[in-house]
Image: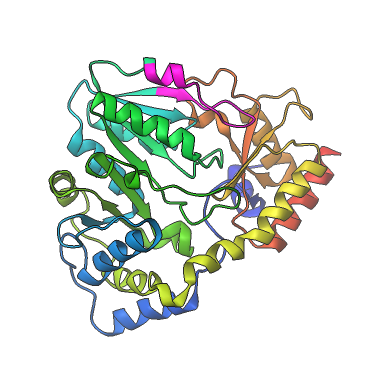
Amino acid sequence: MSQLAIETNSVNLGQGFPDYDGPAIIADAAIDAIRSGHNQYPPGPGIEPLRRAVAHHNFGYYGVNYDPSSEVLITAGATEALASTLISLLEVGDEVIVFEPCYDSYVASIAMAGARAIPIRLHGPNWNFDLQLLQSSVGPRTRAILVNTPHNPTGKVFNLEELKQISNLALENDLLVITDEVYEHLVFEGEHHFLASFEGMRERTISISSAAKTFSFTGWKIGWVTAQPELLAAIRTSKQFLTYVNGAPFQHAIAKGLDPELNLIAEAKDALGPSRELLIGSLERLGLKPLPTSGTYFVNCDISSVTKDDALTFCMRMANEGGVVAIPSSVFYLDREGSEHYVRFAFCKRTSVIEEAVFRLDSWLN
């Protein structure tokens, strides 16, 4: 089967984007903004209503107060927010601790800054890390710790004790902490904790999030950074020469979506619940051994009980022969040894799509 045939005929449970639109009230707000003439460059830091909405959101959910004029920056999604942050705050030769498996843009952006990623492995099936190894990884060139919670690709939600350990390490060694929290509102088990709210951490934490995952408008690329003024000013300097600005009408729409009176954030998680339960239950029935996943769009499976193939080979065969696309989790590791039996599936799809994928998998595996 050709690559074109895979792309057009396979059920895509690989990429982490929904196959449905987000709330109509947000889409209508974008249309209204376009028709109202919000189609030229917005202000460099982002429009004031959205910066104010982000600040109100962080205070309302986490009790941390940010000044919209100097501590909130609107970006072209979380990916640009991360790139701007890393390019701005790292020097050549610096080191950044990352938890692997990790989202692939982390290592690339760290490299673009001339720095080096130091991986700390999250060990399946429960995705724990070795605290002693984390502590011993801090050296004279360590500049920052990058924390993604809820975590892509594992679905791990870092618990309170783990985040306290990370914050203590940052305080003891005068490190920055960069948090990628784009799945902050997609937590199904446990609780999301905002690291900047921990004692002593607000001044050294750069918090990054996005409307893409919460509201299912991934193509709009509206993200944000919150940080103390000196750090944010540096990040804004790099952002100026990456995209400059983006998505003027969409910024107005997301400002409306963040209005707490509309309660759209809670609805986003509720909408994903049935698809999540259907996919995890079906994968378990098929013998693919889903691993614990507390948040995000994703569930990882241990495929070793159904195949001797490594994850990449399995995923290629599953696409070509079974008509279902997933991601070999090994691509998210710097050191792939020991990761060859994990495959990531996305459940941010309509239940009818997941049912079709499960039907195909059942036929292929059996």
Magenta range: 119-135
Q: Position of residue 255 (x, y in %)?
A: 33, 71
- Above or below, 97 against 199 in this view is above
Whether residue 115 appears in this view of the structure is: no
**Quadrant of the drawing holding the N terminus:** top right
The residue depicted at 15 percent of the width and 65 percent of the height is 43
Residue found at the far front of this picture: 199
Q: Nearer the viewer, residue 221 or 205?
A: 205
Left or right? Give the position of 281 relative to 119: right
Left or right? Give the position of 16 relative to 243: right
Q: Position of residue 163 (x, y in %)?
A: 43, 36
Q: How is the image coloured?
A: rainbow
Residue found at the far right of this picture: 366
The residue depicted at 24 percent of the width and 41 percent of the height is 85
Whether residue 134 appears in this view of the structure is: yes
Left or right? Give the position of 182 relative to 202: right
The residue depicted at 78 percent of the width and 42 percent of the height is 284
Q: Position of residue 106 (x, y in %)?
A: 36, 35
**Quadrant of the drawing holding the C terminus:** top right
